[in-house]
Amino acid sequence: MNADFLAVIEFWEREKGISRDVLVSAVVEALTAAAKKAVGPARDLRCVIDIKTGDIKVFAKLLVSEKVTAKHDQISVFDARRIKPDAQLGDEVEVEVTPSGFGRIASQSAKQALMQQIRRAEKDLIFTEFKDRVGDIMSGVVRRFERSDVTIDLGKYEALLPNRERVPTEEYQIGERIRCYVKAVETGPHGPEIILSRADPQFVIKLFQLEVSEINDGTIEIKGIAREPGFRTKLAVHTRDAKVDPVGACVGLRGQRVKNIVRELNNEKVDIIKWDANVKTYIANALSPAQLKAFTVDEPRRRVKIMVAEDQLSLAIGKRGQNARLTSKLTGWQIDIEPETVVTLGFEEKVAQAVQNLAAIPGLTPDQANILVHAGFLTLDDLCQVEVADLEQIEQLKGFGEAIVTAAKAETARRGAVENGQK
């Protein structure tokens, strides 16, 4: 057992980085407990291991007494002086009480103590090593499944990818190597536990930091992110350097940078958006490529009402409302998207509108405008192109034809001058 014991101590010291003194101390503690069972209720029992030879001895302190009434606690003067020549009544003498066959018991106890100490030391090492690695991306191998949770082998340690941190569209196979985000080191019922994630938005941010050097060095800043894991992510980026295109830098030459990230995310869609301090511009960028017609901003309630053409409605809202939902989460504003209502005038309304437009021409009366519309002259252009003789043929307009045409041409000229002046 001695050679084996020393070999095991050396192996675990080298393999796990646990101090030999810590391991030996744990074994001594276990062997002392085992010795108490083997020897009995001895007084001040202690176990000693020779670290060079691996020999194990058990000692007990016995009280020198004139008459021995409790052999586990007392020793006669005669026997005491054989061990310690100057022993007197009332002295304590340490006597070896190593039981026969103790090697097998010691072997079992040492094994259990070592394993317990190794597990305890591993847990302490997990916490010490990983408390500063929260936020990193690590690669590991899928080892086993416990219900919907996945145990990942990181090499020295095992970590947990809980069901809540999995991407719903992803399936993993035992032996498959995957990359995960170290989300936390939690103290569970069995000690510290490394919690990994692939669904956390910070996983995407970290991938961009690794892939895009401008984000890593601070030239480009990530202003916001909204993610529905496995389906779509919106990322808002900004830079104070006018020479740098933040969206272009994240996309990369021929889209190579973002392609690498999308591949890691198993083809999850990634929209990279230019951040803007103006909420209207920011929201318009986030909803792109949908064309927006009008905005109504409610600052106190942080709510925006957006009008879009009917053919742009489904594009703006997205599949199952995903585009609008992610935009709302990204910008922090509640977004309501509604189709623009197009008013369709009936025949009577169109006639009334045409009469009103002609009556607005200086020199024409409402009665004349009504007669002209019912005669088929609906617009100012119609009056500019008509012959005076044609108007004179209308009974109610006899004698007014030339005045009407002159008024129409004068109004056309006036409007043309106004337009040229504005340009």
Image (cartoon, helix red, strand yellow):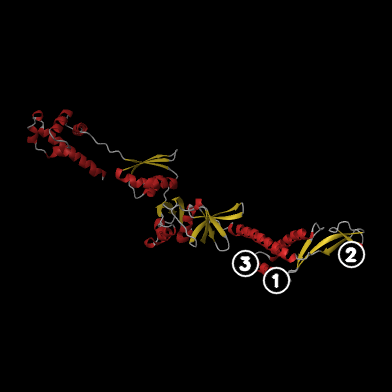
Q: Report how far apart the C-alphas of labels 3 and 2 lie in the structure.
A: 47 Å
389 or 308, nearer to the observer: 308
Whether 101 is drawn above or below 296: the answer is below
| Residue wearing tag 2 | 79
Q: Secondary structure at mark 3?
A: helix
Say if 369 sits above or below 336 in the image: above
Say few, some or many: other residues with alpha carbon within 10 Å of mark 2 (under 14 / 14 to 19 / 20 or more): few
* Residue type marked 3: Glu
In the foreground, 311 or 280: 311
Identify the mark nearer the N-term, 1 or 2: 1
Foreground of the two, 323 or 278: 323
- Name the amino acid type tagged 1: Ala
Disc 1: which residue? 3
Q: Residue at x 77, y 63 (%)?
A: 47
What residue is drawn where x is 37% and y is 47%? 319
Q: Are marks 3 and 1 in contact (CB under 8 Å)?
A: no
Nearer to us: label 3 or label 1: 1
Label 3 packing within 10 angstroms: few (<14), some (14-19), many (20+): few
Rounded to the nearest angstrom, the CA distance separating label 3 from label 1 is 18 Å
Q: Is 192 in front, or is 208?
A: 192
Question: Residue 130: in sight, yes or no?
Answer: yes
SS at circle 1: helix
Disc nearer the start of the sequence (3/2): 3
What's the residue at 61%, 51% (across, down)? 189
N-term-proximal mark, 3 vs 1: 1
255 over 293 or under it: above or below = below
Residue 142 locus on image (x, y percent): 51, 60
Quadrant in the picture for residue 103:
bottom right
Q: Which mark, residue 251?
A: none
**Label 3 sits on residue:** 15
